[in-house]
Image (spheres, rainbow, N blue to C red):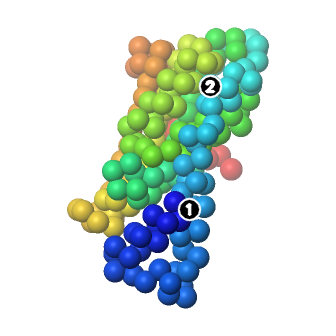
Amino acid sequence: MEKLIRQLLKEIGENPNREGLIKTPQRVEQSLKFLTKGYKEDPVKLLQDSVFEEKYDEMVILKDIELFSLCEHHLMPFYGKCHVAYIPDNKVIGLSKIPRLVEIYSRRLQIQERLTTQIAHTFQKVVKPLGVAVVVEAFHLCMAMRGVEKKNAYCTTSAMLGAFRKNSKTRMEFINLISSKRPF
């Protein structure tokens, strides 16, 4: 990969032997490996190991999960927040696994729409709740720094499964709760 990055630097008109760029190929390789580490992690296994029997069937929400990803079209970052809710069917999951699931899928080359549905469908498949809802709000540098150059536009995507798709009151309760400010 370092060789390719050195060639890329030459192609854009830079001198890869310049003092400030000598270690750039190595740094970029390390950065790309970190930013795409989600390919080496198994989201299903992550969740399977953390599902517990519990007599609980009310909505559980984890909101404002920070995410960072790379747009697969331009290899530029997009970042924002993810909100995940589920209604347990007498099975709950360790809360820390939800941000880890978001991290696994966001650390791959992505489009926001796919990222949103991957989180929702994987959660539904493994945990088997009565419903799952995912909303992602993200700012895309590929749209801000180039192309249309809109610096304040952000994208919101959602995936509603089970009770969240079938019942508009449940869906609206979720939307209202993620829209409210933190109590602390």
Name the image quarter holding residue 9.
Answer: bottom left
Q: Where is residue 48 in the image (x, y as percent from the top left)?
A: 69, 21
Residue at the front extreme of this rendering: 3
Q: Which amino acid does label 1 sit on?
A: Glu
Q: What residue type is labelled 2?
A: Val
Any mark on residue 44, and which? 2
Q: Where is residue 85 in the image (x, y as percent from the top left)?
A: 56, 29
* SS at badge 1: helix
* Local crowd size for mark 2, using a 10 Å CA cut-off: few (<14), some (14–19), many (≥20): some
Any part of residue 175 in sight = no
Q: Where is residue 45 in the image (x, y as percent from the top left)?
A: 67, 26
Q: Where is residue 75 in the image (x, y as percent from the top left)?
A: 40, 56
Please indicate whether residue 68 sits to the left or right of residue 158 in the image.
Answer: right
Mark positioned earlier in the residue sequence (2 or 1)? 1
Residue at the left extreme of this rendering: 148
Residue at (50, 44) in percent of width and height: 108
Residue at (34, 75) in percent of width and height: 12
Name the image quarter holding residue 10.
Answer: bottom left
**Depicted 27 relative to depicted 47: above or below:** below
Residue at (46, 19) in percent of width and height: 161
Query: Which residue carries the number 1 mark?
Result: 29
